[in-house]
Every structure is written in C-alpha cells, then in structure tokens.
Image (cartoon, coloured by chain):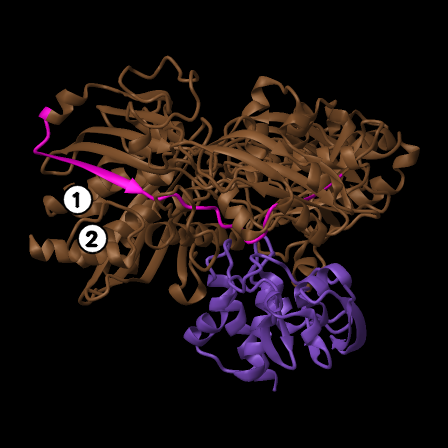
Amino acid sequence: MSQIHVTTSINGDATEFLCEAEDTLLDVLRDRLGMTGSKEGCGTGDCGACSVTVDGRLVCSCLMLGAEAEGREVTTIEGMATGDRLHPLQEKFIEMAALQCGICTPGILVAAKSLLEKNPDPSEEEVRYWLAGNLCRCTGYDKIIRAVMDTAADLRRAS
Amino acid sequence: MALDHSDKPRTFKVVGTRPPRPDGIDKVTGRARFGADIVAPGMLTGRVLRSPHAHARIVKIDTSKARALPGVKAVVTRADFGAVPEDVADVIDNCMAGDKALYDGHAVAAVAASSAAVARKALRLIDVDYEVLPHVTDVDAAMKPDAPVLHAGRQEETVPEGYSQNVMSRVEFGHGDIDKGLAEADRVVERTYRTGATHQGYIEPHACLATMGPDGQADLWCCTQGHYMVRNTCAAILGMEQGQLRVTASEIGGGFGGKTVVFLEPVALMLSKLAGRPVKMVMSRSEVLRATGPTSSTSIDVKIGMTKDGRITAGFAQLRYQGGAYPGSPVDMGSMSAFAPYDLENVKTVGFDVVTNRPKAAAYRAPGAPMAAFAVESAIDELAKGFDLDPLEVRLKNAAREGTVASYGPTFPAIGLEATLEAAKAHPHWTAPLGENQGRGVACGFWFNFGGDTCVTLNVTPDGTVTVSEGNPDIGGSRASMTMMAAEELGIPYDRVRTIIADTGALGQNEVTDGSRVTFAVGLATIEAARNAKREMCKRAAMIWGIDEEAVEWVDGAARPAGPNAGKHDPMTLKEIAAIASNTGGPIAGHYEVNAEGAGVSFGTHMVDVEVDPDTGATKILRYTVFQDAGKAVHPAYVEGQFQGGAVQGIGWALNEEYIYGEDGILQNAGFLDYRIPVASDLPMIDTVILEIANPGHPYGVRGVGETPIVPPLAAIANAVSEAAGVRMTDLPMSPPRVLAAIQGQKGG
C-alpha cells in the first residue's frame, strides 16, 4: 500500500511526512515525527491527553487522521513555550503544583490555552466544563482549575 | 561530629515550603519521557492476543500461520517460558495463560513484528482452540459449594468446610467477646454492604521496551512503581541472574498501586530474546481495563452495638473480597483496618479471599481499606443518627489514641485521629446550612503506612552541589521532597541539590513505591545519607584544622569548631570542603541502606455535602473537606494534592465507577467513556486541612499521606447521600438508577 504524502505546519514549522491512510494525527506526531509530548491515554477521544489545536480548534489528535493535517496549522505542547520562556500557564502549573504524575498535563495545558484565547475571563464553572474532556486521575482537578483561573487573572492584568 | 538529637521541636528552613518541583519543566513542556515515549534502533512492535472467554481450557494454540507472515519476528506462548519458581508461577500465568484462560482479556499469545499493522494481522492468524467452561464473577456466588472452580486443590487449611474451592484462605483479627459486647448495647445494627470493582484508572497505559541479547544480558525500560520489583520478578521468570537485567523506570503516568506488578515486561523480554531485537509493547486502554489490576469487589456483613450515649460495645465484620483470577485479594488489610480508628473492647473481623473469573486484583491506594471503612463507617453513622447523636462526637468518644490496642494487634503510639476529628468539629463546613435534598456525611479512615527496603546515595560534587540518587519512581512530586530533606539536613539551598531516580544497576534493592512509603522511608534514608556526608565533611575539616573530629559540628551548611579545645578556625562551608576534597581523601558521599521501620500509622476524617435529585437519583458533590494527619508536611502543596486526588478517586468509587460484567462474563465497559472516572465538571474544589502530629519513627516526624485519603470518602459520601435521599444506601456505586430505586422503594414501602 502506498503511503500518503502530507504537507502541513506544526508549531509554525513547515513539515512534510508520509503516513498510512489509517494513521491518526497522534500516531504521526508520536511515531513518525518524534513529538511524544502528546500522550495516548485511550485512543478513543475520552481522555484528552492527546489534545492539540488544528487551525486554532481544540481536537483530540487520536480522533483525526494524519492525512487530514494537509494544509492545516497544527500546534502541540511542544510549541507552547517560546524559546526558553515558558507560557504563563506552564509557569503557573509548576508554581501551584497543578500536576502530580504529569501524563495529562500536556493535554490540559493545550486545552487551557485554547480556552483562554477564546475567553480571557472564564468563570470556575466555564473552566471546569471546558476541561471536562481532559481526564486527570491524580489531582482531583482542584489545583488545575485554580492554576488556570489564576493565569487568566494574571494575563488580564498584563493586557 | 556532634549531631543534634535533642527532643525540642526543630524549626525548618526548607521543609514545609513550596518550591517548584525539579521535574516540573519537563512535565509542562512535553519533554518528560513516559513509558511509551522511547524508541530503540531496530525496534519491533509487540502485541498480545487475549482470551475472548471468561473461563476456558486452552486445548491447542496454532501459531504457524502467524509465524509465516512476513515481518513477524517472534511469537510467544506460555510454552516458551517453561517451568518457573513457585513464587512467580501465578505472576507468569497472569501475564501469559497456561492451561486455562481465567478471565476475559487474559493474555494467551504475543507477537513481535516489524510494525503495529503486521503485529495486529499476525494476532488474527493465531488459532486458539478453546473449550469454554462455566464461569463466575460475583464474590458471593463464587463462594457457594457448587460454583465453577478456577483452581482445584489450592485452598488453604484456614477455610472451614462448606465453601467452594474458590475460597482460597480465611483470616481473623480482633480481641474481646463480641456476644458480651452486643449484650451491653442499647441498639445493634446489622447490615450487608457491597462495593463494585474499580480500576486505578491511571491515564498512562502500561508500556515497556525490552532488549535482550544472546549473552543473557538485558535492559528494560518501563513505567512501573518499582523497577527493582520488575527486575527481580522478570529475572525469576526468565531464569536470569538479577544482576544481568538492568531496569530503568520511565516517568510514570499514574499508578495508584496498579503498577506494582508486571504484565508486559516478561513477555517483552521473551519476545526480544527470541527475535534478537528490541521489542516495545504498549497497552491500549481496553487492554488496561480488561487485563490489569482492578481492585476487589466486595460483600461485607457488619454487626455493631452501641449504647445510647454513643459508646461502641462491640464491632464485628465478615469481609468477602474477590481478588480476580488468583489468590491475594487485599481482604487481610481490609480486615485489619476495618475497626482500626476505634478503641474497642470487643472487636472481631473475619476475611475471606475469593477467586473469580476477573482480572487479578492489584493494589489500589490503601488496598482493601476503603471498602471495609465504607461498611463500618456506614453502620456507625446509622447508629449515631438513630440515637440522634452528633456523628463526630460519637467518633471522638470511641477514637483510638496513644495507648489504644488496635483491633489488628499493635498498641498505637502518638496518632492523629482525634486531632482530625477536633479540626473537623471546629471547621465552618460542619455548621454551614444545608438546603432541600441535601445531606452531609462524615467518616474516618486509617492506613498502616509502609517502610521497607530502601537505598539512597548522596554525592557531593567538586563545585559543592549535591546529587541524590534514589530508587523509587517519582509518582507525584517525591523528587522535590527528597531534594528538600537533603537541603534541610545539609543546610544548603534547595536549588543546590538535584535528585534523580537511579536504575537498578546503580543502587541496591528498593521496595516498590507503595503503601505511602516513599516520603517516609526514602526521606529517612536521604536524611541519614546526608548525615553520613556531613560526618565525612566534618572529618575533612578536622583534618585540615588538625583537631579531633569530635570537636567539629555542622551548622547551617558549614563545619565549625565546637567545644572548649577545638581552637579558633573559620567555618568551612560545604562548597569549600568539596573544592579541596581531592586533597583530603577523595570524593565525598553519603549513603544509607535500611529496611525502614516506624512508618507511623495515618488517620483522616472527611466531610462532604451532597445534593440528590429526587427525580433522577443523580448526586452532586457540593462541598468537600479533608482533614488528615501528615506527621510533618514536607511539601504542603503535594500533601494537599494527595488529599484532593484521593478524595476524588473515592468520589468516583462511591458514585460512578464499576466493572460491569454481562451474563457471559465479558467486561462490558472497557473504555473511559463507559468506565467513567470523575471529570472536572463533576466536582467542587476539595478543601484540605493538614494536621501535623509528628511520627516518632522519622527524623522530621513525616508520615506517609498518599493512601489514607481514599479510605473515608466511600462512607462519607454514602452517609451524605443516605441523609439527602432519606434512605440508607448500602451498595456502591450509588449510581443514579440505584439511588432512584432506593428512593422509590422507600416511598413504596
């Protein structure tokens, strides 16, 4: 079976890859491009550990085919920090101990960043519902929700 | 060197603060390497074929067509492993079925192939001839004399006659005279409680990468709670010397007890051995749910007597835990912990370990204790409310304290149960008003806490920084805690110490990360290793100053002359001593090896408000507060995190989570959509109150904190739901249909 040639942009870098028709975007990121920051917790779109954005929209990369990335702009956890400067959400998660094992953290950060870009002043309930698709088994979510709310407040003050 | 061992409470400079964790940046940038995040040159993909039957004799396995498929490099069945030592016989049987498949999802064969697609195709080409057998998945059904038997002839002599051979063993704990105590009671509650089987639900599926050469040396990378356990177990199964197998622990994406055993690792090593190439294996989520450690489902009878002023006169429980396909459910720990929070004259627990056609139960956070606490704390609540007594006062009246002879034998030293109850009573949550259809519940919980084999090495580098090597995977911030304790003891800043998790070649034996042992035992070993390094540095300073080494003390990160005859010398800092170490005898290090005892038991009290929708039976958690004794909170943010995470796992267990088996014995909800763990929108903030009653067994007073938080929630929530719904709930999970049926049954009755 011949592979599919895909031209796309990942974290702002022009990227080409070959993939099988059945490869998910997550398979491509992890196994073909070596970008293992996106995690596979379920492969069925239930846990959110593989969250990325495609043309600005938050998606589970396990539910999208790699071939569908053609001509799109994909951003992943690897694109969140700028050089040696962490994104404010990343800094806040460390500062407030909003992670324990850290496996869900990349997906939650990508999802939270996507929320704050759409809604800079979310209520606690809005944060909880936005992140309802990102499972965390360690923290009980408390410190995660607080870190997102706190970052949002910091960003509002800074803007 | 004179070390400070005075009894006065010490003040801490680093311990008790909240510095950033050393692995934080790796984990927020996606750089941290978990089990599935590694590759090796020439690596193959391994996949497992699993039984579609709950119970079946494996008549024949024909792998010839799979072996003939281009790209297939190795195929493994149980026959490849041959005979193994008795103590790992059940372990390999669980990793790769022998004569029988014992549960839906039980591994029966595995392949290593050039790609995942080829491996999947190869699995479809393996012909397994099954003779399907009758099965049993319910604990009470499995105990009946006519139940289908999983293992004939393995029942222990402790089991009385009249039970199925599925009842593997019986345990008993307690003291006093139950009948006498019950006769003294003004009221006796006798009920049966049931809990569903839940899964640890870690988000990272099991994964490993094995490389084994023809010279018998092997390397293994895997996500595990204990790479020394993986080494020892795999070496025994594969007939290797332990020193020939080097295991490196990846970052671990949650475990909660479920990664204290091996599943893929021996299979990956065997595939690699046969293929002569590295083999990587990663489970899917459905494999995780079907074939890795859930916890026991249970059925528990409780009988408790109480006087009208709230004194418990007798407590009895019979606990029946099914532990899946092999012996070893945590019913012993359930039976020991059931009444541990109380000072009772008459107490007895009897536990039965039962096998069923389900995956072998693995440890799950305070294994065995939450179900027992659910039963006992529910009955105590019912008695308290029946007498119109305050449930916190009733617990205080009966609370175990220093000197109490515990129901399971030992006499408690200083413990923190009363402190958590007093803190709960004084908290504004306790007196906050409740609305319609709302209820408040409280419950207490206990965990033993573990110590065990521990090995730490602390090296002082030539520039005066310090590295700590420990052998326990960092599952929730323990690198930070070890770094803090080393910095505290040495008197140097936190950022001058770096802690790493060493592989099995670098340190001696380390017990797995379990039982809330790490901050206690590895912390203790880290402190002692630092003390040994300090002794050495004092010795070096004494040599330089030409004085007796007993005349040197270590204060605030520097050696200082002490005592009348020490003479006058400027203090030498760690950095100054390290810089000239080569001239004073060579590199400076401290190490410590111990089988740590004195872990210090742990108690907590939880308080929860719920609202039950009388039309749907759905329960909403409105408010939750955890009160727990931490001994000494090393990094309070991570202590809070343990309290919060444990409470929320308990909320899932109480309200949603359950393994659902069909009549055919097949697991019906092997995915996160149908096995629903709590999500952010289900929950309120989880408030925490840390109590610090020092553990006399640790230099800084530390107690483990990870397990206890999952013990009280099942009962606390059941007590709250029972109050809100107006009917006593005895079965978990309290799913909406079950609560609705109870409400309607109450109305109908």
Q: Position of residue B406 (x, y in %)?
A: 33, 26
Q: For the point 40% across and 32% down, which residue is it? A: B356
Image: magenta residue range: B183-210
Q: Residue B382 carries which label?
A: 1
One can see residue B699 in this view = no
Q: For the point 42% across and 42% down, which residue is it? A: B708
In the current view of this chain or complex, which residue is farthest to the top?
A: B157
Q: Could you give the CA–CA distance between mark 2 and mark 1, rounded to whole angstroms?
A: 9 Å
From the image, state the color of chain B: brown
Q: Which chain is purple?
A: A
Q: Residue B417, located in which quarter of the rendered image?
A: top left
Q: Position of residue B405 (x, y in %)?
A: 32, 24
Q: Which mark is residue B419?
A: none
Is residue B203 inside the magenta stretch? yes
Q: How many labels does the image show?
A: 2
In the current view of this chain or complex, which residue is farthest to the right?
A: B583
Q: Which mark is residue B722?
A: 2
Amino acid, disc 1: Glu
Q: Residue A40, located in which quarter of the rendered image?
A: bottom right
Q: Which chain carries label 2?
A: B
**In which quadrant of the rendered image does the N terminus of chain B lie?**
top right
**How many neighbours does mark 1 have within 10 angstroms: few (below 14), some (14-19), or many (20 or more)?**
some
Are dots 2 and 1 in contact, CB under 8 Å? yes
Of marks 2 and 1, which one's residue comes earlier in the chain?
1
